[in-house]
Image (spheres, coloured by chain):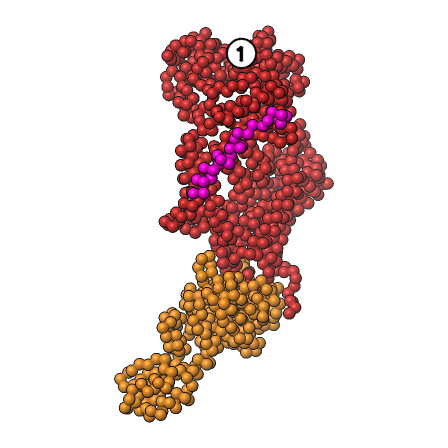
Chain colours: A orange, B red
Amino acid sequence: MIEVKNITKSFAKDLVVSDVSFHVKQGSIYGLLGSNGAGKTTLMRLISGILKQNSGTIHMFGEDVFENLRVKSRLVFIPDSLYFFPQYNVKQLAKYYKEMYPNWSEERYEQLKKIFNLDENKKVHQFSKGMQRQVVFWLSMSAMPDILILDEPFDGLDAVMRRKIKSLIIQDVAERAMTVLISSHNLREVEDICDYIGILHEGEVLLQRDLDDLKTDIHKVQVAFKDFDIAPLKRRLDILYHEKRGSVYLLIVKGNEEEISHTIEKYSPVLYDRLPLTLEEIFIYELGGAGYAIENITV
Amino acid sequence: MPLKTSPFKKEVIKQDFRNVGWIGIVYLIGLLFTLPLQLVMDMNNEHSREMYYENGLFDPVFLYGIQMILLFVLPVLMAIFLFRYVHVRGSADFIHSLPIKRSSLFNYHIISGALLLILPILITGAILFVSYFIWDVGNYYTLSDLGYWASVFAVFSLFLFITSIFVGSLTGLSAVQGVLTYVLLLFPAGMYGLISYNLELFVKGFSVDKAMAQAIEKYLPLLDFLMYQPRTPIGMEVSPPVDSTSIVVYLGLTILLYAASLLIYQKRNIENGNQAIAVLTLRPAFKYGATFCFMLLGGMYFSESQLSYSWLFIGYAIGAIFGFILSDMLLQKTWRVFHIRKLKGLGSYAAVVVILILALPIIARGYESAVPAKDEIKNVYMGSSYSDYQTKRELSAPLIHGSDNVEAVRRVHDELIDAAKPMEEGKRTIFLAYELNNGDKVFREYQVNQQRRIPYMEKVYSSEEYKRMTYDVFQLAPSKVDQLTLHPPMSEEGPVRITDNEEVTRALQLIKKDILSQSYRKPNRFATGLDIGIGYENYNVQLSTSFTNFNQWLKDEGLYDQAYLQAKDVHKIEVLRVSSEARKGESPFDILLRENGLETSDKEKIADVISAANDVGDGYLIGFYQSEDEISTIANLEAGEAPDWITNHFK
């Protein structure tokens, strides 16, 4: 759906996005993670057709996005710092959106009015920051986009509203196979809704993973043996990380869960436990030396 | 995939009206105040019916000045506010993420802006149109005046609006957009003038006067409006502020600028929204352009005040460094731009300039030495300035055309090429204009020292052709002259006025006779001055005490004593020996007050000095006192013409 290939963008002489490629499948939610200044916002502005890349291609529905109305009328971008026309109320803005987006649904608009419970005749500038963000979601979801691009979308929202919006997004993804690209500097904020994660660091993509694969692929285990250490295990398993606490070993192992259990049990351990693994840990172990990039986005 | 959006996006226009509608309203109120309201107010004035307003709707009665302020400010404001969305990151991101092409977005904004500028003009025009049929306003304006007014306002509002949009598409800061719009309007003339001024210092014969006059005429858009003097006296023919060709030209420029802006806007990178110059390729052009302008300006300032080449180059250096740093600050948006590596840019710039200055004399050699061949010349003007030349053309004065005289002018020209020194105190300007047989014109201007004798100069000056060209009196029909005024510099009785047509005719006849019979001699312009008045125009004739026929006639009429400065009117004189070089630009008045010179109240000696003194001259400075310590007028006395008692005193 969103096909980003080898794109590069520099502002004057600063290279901001360098040879970035990734792919977002239709109906999936892709989380673009990176610390401040990693190039997330620029990447999002490129994908939304605001900026033009220096090189590379950005395709949606098989077409270029820049200055392409067919693509842009099915795409909504919500930036991190919101902009509203001065003196406009929600109703007037809705008219503007309605004229711009051909798929605008009045029904959806009315339906969301009840959910958000905001006064549509009030000037948007008089709303609080969090309420303004709700207004934007209200308008954007009413435009019935096939692609939704969100830059740091949950900033300034309380936990209740965050949940509400997440469920709205998930609902559209489930019902209409909407494709979503979310950027965040905080992994925990998005790990519960994303099914894909890409990590952007200094303008480059460090890694991207399908979360479902990831969780079934990496395992944290505690083992203890009576007679030997883990040297034989090392030869048979793909151990990403190990540490020794007393006589107990903590291992991060990559591979099929059954095969791992089978292998370890052959050595008749005195202790064998499988522990829960957070996404954060997965990234840190997976990235190894480049893990410093992760520390910033997992706080 | 078909597009379901409506082709016309009225919400975009609506948003523009919400955003900048107020500017349209201000424009409308302003125009209603200056035109219909003033009309009604003036019509209620009892005397208004008797007046006849010559300037149509551009008359002072319709507050011409305020009309111009509205015309010059509001379209630019409109452009700034309409284009602000591109310059602010938040709005630029939002709007450019919407499914609308940049070109249509741009056109919608242009339509909104143009509508909001044109509507007030149309509404005001409609009110004036209706008023024309309701009231008797024929003495204020005609329908064609109204049509002219509306088209001038419409075209120039659009022109200024689009010019500012064009600047806005290049820059990323609203304030810079405003300033640069006006700079751009001045730019062609300013640049042309600056370059000409500096060229004159390097290329002998190059006429900055002529260049400046042309710069102002040709390269200053909208100057017509600023120079327009609506207060023309009754009875004179009135020309409107701009002619119809200019209107068409400006309309054409508007369309060109529109196309250019649209193109730039489509190509422009949105991320450069808040940069002074948002189109990156233009940044070096802007930077070195500014450096160049400031360099020329610096050179002009220092050379003008110090009159030396070393100061000129110091001025260049100061100006260039200043301009370089200033433009860099603007581009970087910080004052902290002082880095060693910047010297590289400035250094290469300096190298280019040095090469240019060294190459200039070589390039200009052909120009400097070119004197038109004798058989190419139809006629030639020799005089003091380009503007004087233009006056002669307006009066259709016959230029020098006799073969001998033309040859004499050519010899003078040859001599001037060697004698000219552009930077010197006490210089005088000689302007030459050749009109060639093939229709071309050749202009040259030289500055030479007052003292320097130029061979053949006297031959030209004493020729009849020269006199008939130089003295306007030959071009004026005596029947049209309203009055002659003779005004001595200090007089208790006031100037002499001759208004009787027969007397005027006689006086002019005698003056012409005197002029033609005089050999070359500097006219004594000091003892009196003669103005020939035709309507509101005045033509000055330089009289001389040696105009025997005219002076005899004055004596016969009993006017001589009143017409010329007399020793009896002077309390005392003070003589100072000061060469023009020693004055260093100080005013003669200050010098006389500061120094103590030779004083005398002997009437005979005063009479001597009066007959020898002149407006210009080098040697002695004379202060005429009307009481013990009140200087009433100042004259110069050529060293060679001083009476013996002065020469002896200062030996």
Q: Verify whether residue B360 appears in magenta.
A: yes
User: How far across and down, in percent of the image, does residue B119 sit?
Assistant: 64, 49
The residue at the point 46 percent across, 20 percent down is B451
Residue type indicated by callout 1: Thr
Place residue B582 in its image quadrant. top left
User: How far across and down, in percent of the image, does residue B9 sit?
Assistant: 63, 60
Secondary-structure class at tag 1: loop
Viewer-nearest residue: A141 or A193:
A193
Horizontal side of B388 relative to A219 (left or right) equals right
Q: Which residues are magenta?
A: B351-378
Tell me if residue A228 comes above or below residue B182 in the rendering.
below
Viewer-nearest residue: B373 or A104:
B373
Q: Can residue B297 be seen here?
A: no
User: How far across and down, in percent of the image, does residue A168 sit?
Assistant: 52, 74
Quadrant where the image shows the C terminus of chain B: top left
Tell me if residue A61 comes above or below residue B527 in the rendering.
below
Q: Can residue A215 be seen here?
A: yes
* Outermost residue toward the left in this view: A246
The residue at the point 49 percent across, 35 percent down is B362
Using the image, name the chain to which the residue with label 1 belongs: B
Q: Which residue is mark 1?
A: B545
The residue at the point 42 percent across, 32 percent down is B309
Number of other residues with Cα within 10 Å of mark 1, as a class: few under 14, some 14 to 19, many 20 or more: some
Quadrant where the image shows the N terminus of chain B: bottom right
Horizontal side of B514 relative to B572 (left or right) equals right
Viewer-nearest residue: A183 or A139:
A183
Horizontal side of A260 relative to B256 (left or right) equals left
Chief secondary structure of the magenta portion:
helix
Place residue B459 in its image quadrant. top right
Tell me if residue A148 comes above or below residue A50 in the rendering.
below
The residue at the point 67 percent across, 39 percent down is B244
